[in-house]
C-alpha cells in the first residue's frame, strides 16, 4: 500500500501553463488545497486567449500569499512592499502607458494595508486591472483579522470571533468609480477566466474579486475542514446574480456568496482626462508620452521592447511552439 | 452517456477523447481534480509521491473527454489533458 507512486512518463511534455510561469520556481509555496494556484491558471488562460503580446503585460503584487504571484509568472513583474502594489502600478502605467498593468494581490494587502491606494486608484479611474484574491484572512503573517473577515469568524487576533463589520468589496470599488466589477470563487474556473478576458479587453479601473480557500488558517481556525470542504461549500452556496446591486453583496460567515459581473461601463481614464486637460490648458506646448510607450527623456534610440530582452522572449516562443498550442 | 435531449446533429457529433497526464511529484493531493472531473476518470491513489501526498490516478482509461477541467482547477499545475487523436502531443480542445 505505502508504495511510491510512479511517474508515468509524459514524453517530455510540460504542462500547458509552463510558458506563462517561471517553472524553475515551481512547485510553489502555497498550501495544499489553497485556491491561489487555480486563479493563476485562469489568469494565464485568459492571457493566452486574449492573444496579447506578453512583453506588453506587467504584473505587480504586494506582500502576502497572493503577493507571490508576481514572482511565479513569467511576465515583467514587480514584487512590492506591503500594501503598495497599486502605487507602483500607478507609476508603471503612467510611465509606460502601452502596458497592460495587472495588480495581483490579496485582501489584506490591497484593501487592508493598501486600502487608501485602492480607493484613490478607483476614484481616478486609473487604467489597471486589479485581481484581488480574498481568503478572508491575513494568511502569510499568521491569520490575523483582515478587513474582509466575516463577522463572528475566528482569527488568531480575534479568538472569540470577529465583531467588526467587513468590507463589501464590489460595493467599495463601484462607489469609488471602478468601471468593471466582478466577483467569483476559485471554483468558478470557466466564468472567472471569461471575466479576466473581459476585464483585459476593457479600459479603466477593473476589479475582479476571487474568493479562495485558505486551508491552513481560515479553515483551520474556524474548524471548517480543508480547502476541499470550502470548495464544496462554494459549490452549494455561491449564487450567480449578474448585475446585482452591489449594496447587497455583503458576505456573512458561512453564508451565501453572490457572484457575477456587477458593473461594466465606460468612463474616461486618468490618462485620458490628464491629456485632455493639458491639451486644453497648454495647447501646442503639451507633449504627451507617445501612445506606444517609451521613455520621457528619449535617448535617441527607438524604444524596442523586443530587442530589450531577447533571451526571455525567445525562450518563451520556443517553449510555446513546442507544445503547439491552438 | 445519458442525454438531456438528443441534439439534431447527433450523428455528426463526435465526443472528443483526451489523455490525462499527471505530473505526480508536483501534486499536493488536494483532490479537486478527482472531485470535479465530470466523467469520474480519476481517483486518489493509495500510493505516495515523493512529497508524501497521494496523487490522483486514472481509473477509467479512455473516458476522458478532454474538457481541461482538471487542468484548470488544479492549484499545483500538476495535471493536464491533451487530445488523444494526435497521440497526446499537447494540443488542446477549445
Ligand atoms: S479533462 Fe475533464 S474529463 Fe478529462 S480527466 Fe480532466 S476533468 Fe476529467
Ligand atoms: S488537483 Fe492537482 S494537486 Fe490536487 S489532487 Fe489533483 S493533481 Fe493533485
Image (cartoon, rainbow, N blue to C red):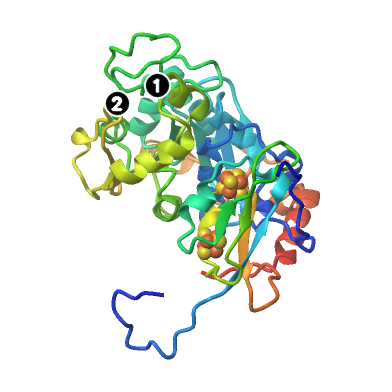
Residue at 28% across, 49% down: A265
| Both marks 1 and 2 on one chain | yes
Q: Position of residue A171 (x, y in %)?
A: 26, 33
Viewer-closest of A50 and A214: A214
* Quadrant location of the C terminus of chain A in the rendered image: bottom right
Relative side of A199 to A167, left or right: right
Q: Is residue A217 visible?
A: yes
The residue under label 1 is A222
Residue at 75% across, 44% down: A3
Q: Is residue A42 visible?
A: no
Q: Position of residue A301 (x, y in %)?
A: 74, 48
| Mark sitting earlier along the chain (1/2) | 1
Q: Which mark is residue B62?
A: none
Q: Position of residue B29 (x, y in %)?
A: 60, 42
On the image, which quarter does residue A134 sit in? top left
- Dot in front, 1 or 2: 1
Marks 1 and 2, how far apart at CA = 10 Å
Graded by Cα atoms within 10 Å as few (under 14), some (14 to 19) or many (20 or more), the crowding at tag 2 reads some
Q: Are marks 1 and 2 in contact (CB under 8 Å)?
A: yes
Question: In terms of secondary structure, where does tag 1 sit?
Answer: loop
Relative side of A118 to A65, left or right: left
Viewer-closest of A190 and A58: A190
The residue under label 2 is A253
Q: Position of residue A242 (x, y in %)?
A: 25, 50
Residue at 57% across, 39% down: A59
Given the image, what chain letter belongs to the residue carrying mark 1? A
Residue at 18% across, 40% down: A245
Relative side of A202 to A24, left or right: left
Amino acid at each position: 500500500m505505502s508504495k511510491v507512486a510512479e511517474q508515468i512518463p509524459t514524453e517530455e511534455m510540460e504542462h500547458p501553463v509552463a510558458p506563462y510561469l517561471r517553472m524553475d520556481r515551481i512547485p510553489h509555496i502555497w498550501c495544499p488545497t489553497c485556491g491561489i494556484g487555480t486563479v493563476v491558471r485562469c489568469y494565464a488562460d485568459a492571457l493566452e486567449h486574449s492573444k496579447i503580446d506578453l512583453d506588453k503585460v506587467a504584473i505587480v503584487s504586494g506582500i502576502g500569499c497572493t503577493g507571490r504571484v508576481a514572482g511565479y509568472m513569467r511576465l515583467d513583474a514587480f514584487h512590492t512592499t506591503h500594501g503598495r502594489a497599486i502605487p507602483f502600478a500607478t507609476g508603471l502605467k503612467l510611465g509606460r502607458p502601452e502596458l497592460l498593468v495587472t495588480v495581483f494581490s490579496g485582501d489584506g494587502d490591497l484593501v487592508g494595508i493598501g486600502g487608501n491606494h485602492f480607493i484613490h486608484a478607483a476614484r481616478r479611474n486609473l487604467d489597471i486591472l486589479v485581481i484581488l484574491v480574498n481568503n478572508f484572512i491575513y494568511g502569510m503573517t499568521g491569520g490575523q483579522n483582515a478587513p474582509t473577515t466575516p463577522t463572528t469568524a475566528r482569527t488568531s487576533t480575534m479568538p472569540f470571533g470577529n465583531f467588526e463589520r467587513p468590507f463589501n468589496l464590489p460595493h467599495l470599488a463601484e462607489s469609488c468609480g471602478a468601471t468593471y466589477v466582478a466577483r467569483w470563487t476559485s471554483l468558478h474556473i470557466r466564468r472567472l477566466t471569461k471575466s479576466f478576458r473581459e476585464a483585459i479587453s476593457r479600459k479603466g479601473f477593473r476589479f475582479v474579486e476571487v474568493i479562495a480557500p485558505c486551508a491552513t488558517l481560515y479553515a483551520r481556525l474556524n474548524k471548517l475542514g480543508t480547502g476541499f470542504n470550502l470548495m464544496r461549500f462554494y459549490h452549494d452556496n455561491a449564487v450567480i446574480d449578474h448585475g446585482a446591486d452591489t449594496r447587497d453583496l455583503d458576505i456573512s460567515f458561512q453564508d451565501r456568496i453572490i457572484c457575477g459581473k456587477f458593473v461594466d461601463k465606460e468612463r474616461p481614464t486618468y490618462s485620458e482626462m490628464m491629456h485632455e486637460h493639458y491639451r486644453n490648458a497648454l495647447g501646442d506646448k503639451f507633449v504627451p508620452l507617445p501612445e506606444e510607450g517609451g521613455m520621457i527623456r528619449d535617448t535617441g534610440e527607438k524604444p524596442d521592447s523586443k530587442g530589450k530582452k531577447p533571451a526571455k522572449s525567445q525562450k518563451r516562443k520556443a517553449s510555446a511552439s513546442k507544445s503547439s498550442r491552438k | 452517456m445519458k442525454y438531456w435531449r438528443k441534439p439534431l446533429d447527433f450523428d455528426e457529433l463526435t465526443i472528443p477523447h483526451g489523455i490525462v497526464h499527471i505530473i505526480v511529484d508536483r501534486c499536493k493531493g488536494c483532490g479537486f481534480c478527482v472531485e470535479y472531473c465530470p466523467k469520474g476518470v480519476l481517483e486518489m491513489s493509495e500510493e505516495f509521491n515523493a512529497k508524501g501526498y497521494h496523487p490522483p490516478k486514472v481509473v477509467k482509461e479512455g473516458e476522458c473527454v478532454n474538457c481541461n477541467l482538471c487542468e484548470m482547477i488544479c492549484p499545483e499545475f500538476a495535471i493536464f489533458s491533451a487530445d488523444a487523436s494526435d497521440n497526446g502531443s499537447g494540443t488542446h480542445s477549445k
